[in-house]
Image (cartoon, rainbow, N blue to C red):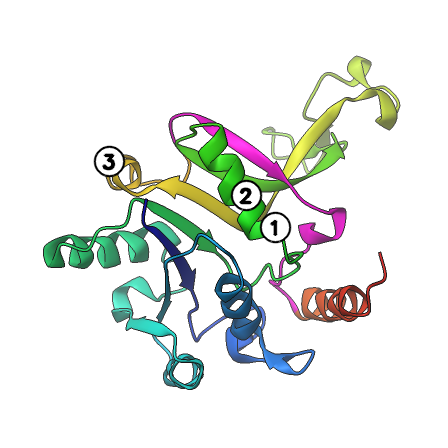
């Protein structure tokens, strides 16, 4: 089985300008994910997809293969799936299609050393079609605006069904850190999650993704704690 680690790293970002190349704990953000992939047994190849010259230079310095993503797949509203499908179509034409893809988003860098390998092993052992990483939590109290347009809110469930948070039952919150899926199935479904879907549980602090300046601050503090061996 051939396993490709795919790392999407656009140069632009509205919430945190240039976040994938911004320095976090002494390294550009994308470098943390590249190094984690490099240290994972079972990954045969790493591909960074980017539209940014500085990120390309980071890859070059690390001797990691990168692919220049076309501008139409590097917009704020571009999906990761669109960019990956473009890369896979090119790979198919060259006859180098991988069997399994491990999608690693640089904006979710709080992975323990074993996480990627353990997720890949779980994917293989369960004979799954796709896998997502998540943290265990409890259903929060979600509210939504009423359709009446009068500015009032309603709970997503009938109010009479409210109960203590501890009684709501365990659910899993997708953390955006690790996805594993069959390459052929991805091309057919054009989605990272399809068929038999399994979950790989991660530490609670891995739920933080970098979308805002506040997120960046929080993740950097948590990364410092993780590097210091504090749990």
Judged by depth in the image, the label closer to the viewer, 3 or 2, is 2
- Would residue 80 appear left or right of 107 to someone viewing this image? left
Q: Earlier in the sequence, mark 3 or mark 1?
A: 1
Question: Of label 3 and label 2, which has the lower sequence position?
Answer: 2
User: Residue at 38% of width from left, 74% of height from top?
Assistant: 64
Q: Secondary structure at mark 3?
A: helix
Rendered residue at 41%/63% (across/down): 8
On whether residue 195 falls in the magenta region, the answer is yes
In the image as oriented, which residue stretches furthest toward the top?
160
Q: Which residue is mark 3?
A: 188
* Left or right of residue 201, residue 84 in this image: left
- The residue that mark 2 highlights is 119
Q: Is residue 225 magenta?
A: no
Q: Is residue 14 visible?
A: no
Quadrant containing the N terminus is top left
Residue 147 in sight here: yes
Nearer-the-camera pick, 59 or 73: 59
Task: Choose mark 3 or mark 1, whichever is in front.
Answer: 1
Within 10 angstroms of label 1, few (less than 14), some, or many (20 or more) residues?
many
Q: Secondary structure at mark 2?
A: helix
Q: CA distance from mark 3 to mark 2?
A: 23 Å
Where are the magenta residues, as a range?
194-212
Dots 2, 1 in contact, CB < 8 A: yes
Give the position of the C terminus as an image quadrant: bottom right
Residue under pointer 1 = 115
């Amino acid at each position: 089985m051939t396993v490709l680690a795919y790392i999407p790293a656009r140069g632009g970002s509205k919430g945190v300008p240039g976040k994938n190349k911004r320095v976090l704990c002494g390294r550009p953000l994308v470098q943390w994910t590249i190094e984690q992939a490099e240290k994972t047994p079972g990954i045969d190849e790493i591909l960074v997809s980017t539209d940014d010259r500085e990120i390309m230079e980071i890859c070059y310095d690390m001797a990691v293969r990168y692919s220049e993503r076309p501008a139409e797949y590097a917009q704020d509203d571009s999906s990761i799936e669109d960019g990956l499908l473009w890369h896979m179509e090119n790979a198919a034409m060259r006859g180098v299609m991988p069997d399994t893809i491990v999608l690693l988003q640089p904006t979710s860098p709080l992975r323990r050393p074993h996480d990627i390998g353990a997720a890949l092993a779980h994917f293989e052992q369960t004979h799954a079609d796709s896998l997502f990483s998540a943290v265990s939590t409890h259903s929060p109290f979600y509210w939504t605006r009423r359709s009446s347009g009068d500015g009032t809110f309603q709970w997503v469930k009938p109010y009479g069904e409210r109960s203590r948070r501890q009684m709501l039952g365990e659910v899993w919150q997708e953390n955006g850190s690790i996805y594993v899926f069959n390459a052929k199935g991805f091309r057919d479904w054009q989605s990272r999650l399809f068929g038999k879907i399994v979950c790989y549980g991660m530490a609670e602090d891995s739920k933080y993704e970098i979308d805002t300046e506040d997120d960046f601050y929080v993740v950097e503090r948590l990364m410092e704690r993780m590097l210091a061996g504090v749990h």
